[in-house]
Structure formats: structure tokens, C-alpha cells
Image (spheres, rainbow, N blue to C red):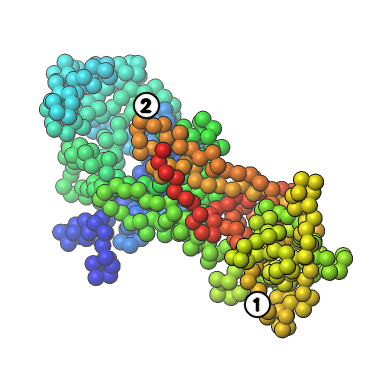
Amino acid sequence: MSAEEKSLNFIEQIIEDDLKNGLSSDKLRFRFPPEPNGYLHIGHASAICLNFGLGIDYKAPVNLRFDDTNPSKEEQEFVDAIKKDVEWLGFKWDKECYASDYFQQLYDWAVELIKKDKAYVDSQSSEDMAIQKGTPTSPGTDSPFRTRTIEENLDLFTRMKNGEFDKGTHVLRAKISMKANNMLMRDPIIYRIMHAHHHRTGNDWCIYPMYDWAHGESDYLEQISHSFCTLEFLPHRELYDWFLNQIYDETKVRPKQREFARRNLSHTVVSKRKLLQLVEEKHVTAWDDPRMSTISGMRRRGITATAIRNFANTIGIAKRTNLIDVSLLDFCIREDLNKIAPRVMAVLNPIKLVITNYPEGKEEWLTAENNPEEEVMTYREVPFSKELYIEREDFQEEAHKKFFRLTLGTEVRLKNAYIIKGESVVKDAEGNITEIHCTYDVDSKSGSGTEASNRKVKGVIHWVSIPHAVEAEVRLYDRLFTHENPDGNKEVDFKEYINPESLKVITGYVEPSLQTAKELDHFQFQRLGYFCVDRDSTAEKLVFNKTVGLRDTWAKVSEQ
């Protein structure tokens, strides 16, 4: 890649500068380092696209490395889900790695730190440790255990490893400076005791490395050239480099940590802790609930991998955190689905329409195009009969001049079929319309080439033949939160902004061609929006999820 080929972002410029300063291009290696304590979300998708995109652009390998240093929160379920999500997004990793692969080496290096008097075992309580660490404006004070001898530290650390002590009894800390301006440099914890079963190493270990210790050293062991993370890790960079200084061999690649800003999405939360809360408190059905910002939830909703990749490329990366309007994601979804989703007819708020002059018992199979965006047009046959369902909103008994759908005394075209004219209605005892009666122009069949078929009418509406209609459960999803930044105000519980209208379940009717639709098949329900088949769907009961409407109809909710 060169600056002449494309405009470089600041991350690419860092790489280009390193290449110009002597880093060999065959030494480039990137990584995506998720913690397997939950499902990946849209924020992770951006990081995945960044790291794997760099791998593609620079023809460099990218590792998938699981930061599995906290067994109390990590599960194999999450490992499997993360791998599925990365693959589904269209990326392939070079090596599948785990921080746990390096537990022995990390331990051995910690022992070396103790021998060099650069680490010590601290036996304070966590409360006392927090007090002696000081504040951002006042220096910390040395732990009373900071002067332990090397021999005593080695003995205690070995016994910690051997499981002789309870959780919280001791920790291993780096001996840096309790007066450092960066509080992360004030003798940070390297190891803590945890008697917990690890999903890969079982009960082999009862001490586990802290993230800051494992992260940079794992990058070094894998010879990662550039370790990209979000801005909250900027203060950690100094510690990342200090730890590397203790082990670095000049004959090897030294990893470089650099940071980019989170791109938060409006009407969404992306904190794994808060997403877990939504699941555990049953505000949603599961991690893959289509209202969730998880990649698995978005996939189930019908959002495509292409749309997510295009979204990530569109928003790019930046040095400052900002809030991206979710309507931009919706735009990317529509743009992709418009190209690939077959057009079908479905009626979600049905009212019966009877064509009074259509022969009793007659049915026709009419030709309909599948997708006008296809390079080579394909078609399907849809059944037509005397009795149809149309959308209740497509009829008004008395309408204003700008209502171009069906009214009494006016004509509209039934999509792919005939021109009809509203004649009368049937009402129940409460005055509600239960049936619309109309007549059709026999010679106006779409595509027939007759003079009548070429007549122009102002409205076109969709329909489903009642004798052939397939009943379906339709789940209408909307934004999970009414506020554009639900976790932006720390004084307000983000759950206060949960949208009570985020899911409506209705019964609709679809054309029979959808009877054989499979999970995650995408469709445009004409004039209604994009939908996909949910995993709950069966041959006996079709279930569709609304992915996105045909246009952005969301009105901004004012802040209360």
C-alpha cells in the first residue's frame, strides 16, 4: 500500500512510517484479541474489520487471540460464538491463539522479575491497597511489603502457584514507582489468586495473570507488529512498554500499541456488562435477540455481513470518540439488501377484498419479477383469485386528494395483476369495515400488452390471494432504546430508556413461494420493508423478523 494508492487513515500512516523506517513488510502481523466473556457486538465488528482489513491490505497474517485470563467469567460457549462471528463477517485468521497458551512462560517471566527485584508479593487487603495507591493528584505510598526479600517473594509466589493460599490473600505486583503520575504505573498487580476452573487449562492454575501483563507479552510471543486498541487503553501504553522492556530481545519484533477511538452507535449499548444485564434480567430473550447490538443478534435480525463491513468502512477510524447515528447502519443494510433480497408480497394488517366480477372458483398464476436489481432477471409465479388480502392502510372509504391508494370510485393497480375500482364496503355492527368490494378491468392484466394494461393509474398496491395465503408470525423490531445515548448519563439507569415498543408480534399472510424459505433467507416484503426467516421458523409455522424498513421512519425522541 502507498499514499498514492489511497488516502491513508492515521493507523495506516503509522504502519507506512514504520515500513519507511526499516520494518520489513514480512514482519507485519496483526491480531484481534477478544475476551471470551460474552458475545461480540457492533463495536467489536469495527475492530475486526480494522485488524483483518489491514491484514488484507498489507497481505499480512492476523491472529485471533482469546484473552482468557479470567476464568470466573469465561466460557467455551463464548469462544465458539466469537469464532463463528469472525468467520461470518468474512475473515480468516492465521493462528488461533489463547493467552492461556502462554501461562507457563508468563509465570516464568514473573519469576525473573522477582529475581531482578522488579516484582514483589503484596499481602495487603484490596481496600488498603487502594488507599496506599494515592489519587491522580497525590502520590501513592509504598506497601509495607514492598521491601520483602527476593527469597521471600520467590517462596510466596511459588506457594501462591501451588494453591496454598485463599483468594485475596496475596497478589504479585510490579515494583515500578508509587509516585508515578500515571496511576497504572504505581506498582500494578501482575498476578492474583483465583481458585476457578479454566475452560482450557482446567485446574492446572490457581493464579492468573492480569490483562496488562498478559496482553503485551502475548503480542511479543506472537511477534505482533502493531497492537491496535481503543482509546481507553492509551494510559496503559506506558505500562505495556515497561513490561516489554523487561523481556525484549532486540533480534525480535517489538510490538507497538496504538489507540483509536470507539465509534459508539446511537440508541444502543455496547458494554458487555450491560448486554449481559439485559439478558439476565430478561429484557431480551438471549444474546442473539434481534434487538441486541451483538453480531449474533444482528445476524439473526437479517443484517448481512456485507452491510456491517460497509458500515465499518464508512465510519472509518478516528482519534476522538463520537456517536454514530444508527440510521447510517440502517442505510448500509438497505443498500445491501436492495441488491440481494427477492421481492415478495406479504400483507401484515389484512383486510379482505372481493373482486365481484371475477369468476367464482377461478385462479390465475401471474408472473412477477424477483428483483429488479438482478443482472439477469428472474421471475416467479404468484396465484391470483377472486378474494384477496390487502393492507388495511391501503384503503380509505373517503380520502383526501393526495391519497393515491384505493378508495370508493377510484382505480388502483394490483401489483403484477389488474386495475381494480372500489365499489362498496361491508361493515360490522360497530361500523368497522370488514370487506371491500371492487370490480376489475378484465383487459388490464400487467404485461399483457393490451391498451387497457398500459393505462396509467396513480396507485399500485400489493396483495395476497386468500385461498393461497400462508399464515406467518411476523416480529416487528424497532430500536431497543428510545434515547440516542442510553448510557450517556451516569445518573440515569440505562434501562430506563428501554423502548416498550421495540418488539411487536403480529400474524401476517405471505405468498406461497415463501413456504420453503429457510433460516436467514432475506426478502423485501414489497412496500413494507426487509425481512428474514427466523431460526424459530418451521414448515408448519413460518416466522419472519423485520430487519429494517424501506426508509427511515424513526422520529427522534426528545430528551426528557
From this viewpoint, is residue 409 visible? yes
Residue 259 image point, x, y percent: 25, 47
From this viewpoint, is residue 517 visible? no
- Residue at horizontal 60%, vertical 44%? 504
Q: Is residue 293 above or below residue 351?
A: above
Q: Is residue 49 above or below residue 411?
A: above
Pointer 2 local density, CA inside 10 Å: few below 14, some 14–19, many at least 20: some
Quadrant position of residue 159: top left
Front residue of 370 and 446: 446
Front residue of 422 and 316: 422
Pointer 1 local density, CA inside 10 Å: few below 14, some 14–19, many at least 20: few
Q: Amino acid at mark 1?
A: Lys
Image quarter in which the N terminus is found = bottom left
Q: Is residue 52 above or below residue 460?
A: above
Residue 460 image point, x, y percent: 65, 68
**Numbered badge on residue 456:** 1
Quadrant position of residue 502: top right
